[in-house]
Amino acid sequence: MKNSTNIYYTCALLLSLVVFVNCKDKKDKEMKEETPKKNISKVGITESNYGTTQDGKKVTQFFLKNEGGIEVDIITYGGRITSLRTPDKDGNMENVVLGFDDLAQYEKDNPFFGALIGRYGNRIAKGKFSIGEEEYTLAQNNGENSLHGGIKGFDKQVWEAKTEVGENSASLILTYLSKDMEEGFPGNLSTTVTYTLNDDNSLDVLYEATTDKATVVNLTQHAYFNLSGDFSNTILDHVVEIDADTYLPVDSGLIPTGELRPVEGTPFDFREPKTVGEDISEENEQLKLGGGYDHCWVLNDQQAGFRKVASAYHPATGRFLEVSTDEPGIQFYTGNFLDGTLPAPNNSTYAKRSGFCLETQHYPDSPNQEEFPSVVLNPGETYTTKTTFTLKTK
């Protein structure tokens, strides 16, 4: 009888344990299913104080990073990209854009390092243009011409900022209100530029603007690239490709003549990849006028909208830059006016052709050349354009 009782209690205990384990497993499974998956992406934004302008405005620096190993620093003064660090083919991280170490240097005269350019990127002849019967006069800050928005363009303004972080992207949203007749341009122009760093190693630059009076708008980004990561090197060994059958020849003031000249048979033919230095020293009137390449290429397939238009490759490091846009033109500039007077990292200076620009935009002097695509923005319309810089290795 005693043995039977022991067997009974043993069976009961075993049954209780089985029920308990089953219930616990079920509960753990339910809790696991109810717990949302964590975002494992390393994308993110942090901010820090970058200093105060001479007129007392606080400037903030934003640090964007992604899972693919790209790191971008942007300041609210001019919306400038101050650093863009990317790995080479061996995984070595280096900054590949020209810039300065402090705000004071950015406030001094400089060639628009990393800046947002507006209201009008590039040149307007003689600093004048008309909309209808109304003529407007701008500052002549580039010889007799107006360049990059005037004396105090968007590159010298402190922008308002906010951030957004998604699962696979981090965005810095910059806004600026350019008041009616600022630098001579009509209309109150509300501008938003959104930098978005994605986990596929692309950096989107989305430009948007509205106005309460007819005006002209041509925004661009003025980063100087040197994919070697060593600014003591020139960019002559970079291999560049530009999808354009024609370009815009210029006069002595670097204003387009109005001609769309075929690139075929000229140093301006980058339809197949070639090094920057291959033809830059050829005897050519246009190269002499620009001191090298400082021209706008008329991009192919404009009706297609957003598409790949240009690339640059540095064979020694394997870094590859791809540019996509919906703009009709791209200004390829090879740093011809850098002269060794501006400070660079490691107690050096930025020498001639130590950086290049690929500025997506409408054509220079479009307000004065009716045959060029229009840059007029009217009330009730929204100016929208996007450029993407994608960084890879190969």
Image: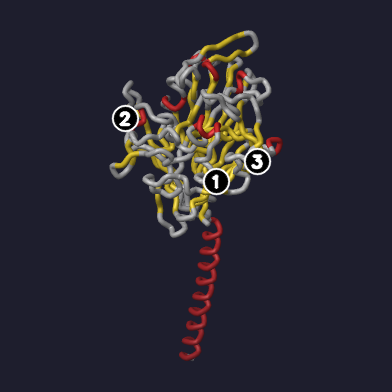
Most extreme residue toward the right, as rendered?
303
The residue that disc 2 covers is 104
Vertical comparison of 175 with 34: above or below: above
**Earlier-in-chain disc, 2 versus 1:** 2
Q: Secondary structure at mark 2?
A: helix
In the rendered image, residue 164, in percent from the top left (x then y), is placed at 49, 39
Per the image, the residue denoted by label 1 is 240
Q: Hey, what amino acid is under mark 1?
A: Val
Tell me where residue 213 sits by quadrant: top right
Residue 390 pos. (x, y %): 54, 46
Which residue lies under the disc numbered 3?
264
Foreground mark, 1 or 3? 3
Label 3 neighbour load within 10 Å: few <14, some 14-19, many 20+: few
The first of marks 3 and 2 along the sequence is 2
Q: Where is 145 relative to 89, above or below?
A: above
**Mark-to-mark CA distance, 2 and 1:** 33 Å
